[in-house]
Amino acid sequence: NADTALYRAKDLGRNNFQFYSSSMNARALERMAMESSLRRMFERQELRVHYQPQVGLQSGRITGLEGLVRWEHPVGNMIAPSVFVPLAEETGLIVPMGEWVLQAGCYQLKTWLDAGFAPMRLGINVSAHQLQKSDFAELVMQVLKECDLPPHYLNLEITETVIMHNMNEAFETLRRLRAVGITISIDDFGTGFSSLSYLKDLPADHLKIDRAFVQNLPFGNNEANIARHIIEMAHGLNLKVIAEGVENQAQLDFLREAGCDEIQGFLVSRPLAAEDITEILTNDEMLLNFEEDKTCGKD
Ligand code: C2E
Ligand code: MG
Ligand code: MG
Ligand code: MG
């Protein structure tokens, strides 16, 4: 709100504050204040990674964890990525931020694996700026080496919009990453307004159905048809399907029936701090309990 915007804007210095307050609206002020504290966030070590489980619909067990960045702002509480990731993208700060998340996530997964927990993937979101860097693949491999984490544990989540941005180069980078064993997920699938033609050569392993197509399942007739056909198409292209934003049992039942491979969403768990994930892993909790079907096969 405007009060905190003005309060934060004071950080920018008295002169700036006086100048801008008369010529800019509160929203612009807030933006500037956000940007400057975003820049200081690194020094202050205010970034966190939370982890959200992805669960196999055959086994009911954790197959992967998606790392999601959080900003623990000293004034407010946790600030959601929807607030600061877009700003970080605009300012280019997403590059060091993304690198930090990758590093922190890889160290954390290594710690879990070393503790003897069952193998699982780490999903890391990659922004357009990162993928565009010519040394992105090298950087990722360097981080894996530093963490002593075998590449097949790492799964990079990339939206179709990011891939379409510079398709030939993006495909080339994805191929290099896959060649060493890193897996690729297409994130937010279906929301990118992109042509389906890119799918035929897509160097990817998983497709994540966006929450928008999951939300009204199984009741929305269109959503149900779209979801079914995305799953069928993905399998035809040799991609595994992960449904995002699964919040209730009815959605789960539909997706399972439709042959979806994995789900992620509040029904299973919210994104959690590492120590809470450790607790789940330690208790070896089955995150999904299937009532009728006990013939738990493999994923
Ligand atoms: P995303 O990659 O599609 O991540 C899934 C988002 O859906 C997360 O939001 C997660 O908390 C939320 N979610 C999961 N299950 C449910 C559910 O059942 N219901 C609802 N309503 N929401 C659910 P979050 O953590 O706020 O992140 C939002 C977006 O910010 C991410 O979307 C991703 O695009 C971006 N983001 C997060 N961390 C990073 C990062 O480290 N780097 C980059 N470049 N982007 C990131
Ligand atoms: Mg994601
Ligand atoms: Mg997503
Ligand atoms: Mg999404």
Image (cartoon, rainbow, N blue to C red):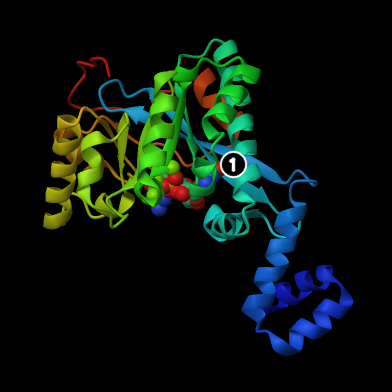
Q: Residue at x 11, y 56 (%)?
A: 221
Q: Quadrant of the N terminus?
A: bottom right
Q: Quadrant where the C terminus lies?
A: top left
Outermost right residue: 14
Q: Horizontal placement of 94 versus 217: left or right? A: right
On the image, the x and y values in percent for residue 61 come to 36, 22
Secondary structure found at label 1: helix
Q: Is residue 126 left or right of residue 23?
A: left
Query: Where residue 124 sits: x, y (%)?
Result: 50, 35
Q: Residue at x 54, y 10 (%)?
A: 116
Q: Quadrant of residue 268?
A: top left
Residue drawn at (61%, 45%), measured in percent from left and top? 95
Nearer the observer, 261 or 22: 22
- Which of the 4 image quarters holds residue 234? top left
Question: Can you give x and y, in whole percent of width and height, for residue 180 in the image?
Answer: 44, 18
Count the marks: how many?
1
Label 1 CB, ligand 1: below 8 Å? yes
Q: Quadrant of ligand 2?
A: top left
Q: Is residue 1 visible?
A: no
Disc 1 target residue: 98
Q: Nearer the viewer, residue 69 or 187?
A: 187
Residue 248 x %, y %: 30, 45
At label 1, the amino acid type is Gly
The quadrant holding residue 60 is: top left
Q: Residues within 10 Å of mark 1 (few under 14, many from 20)?
A: many
* Left or right position of 262 against 19: left
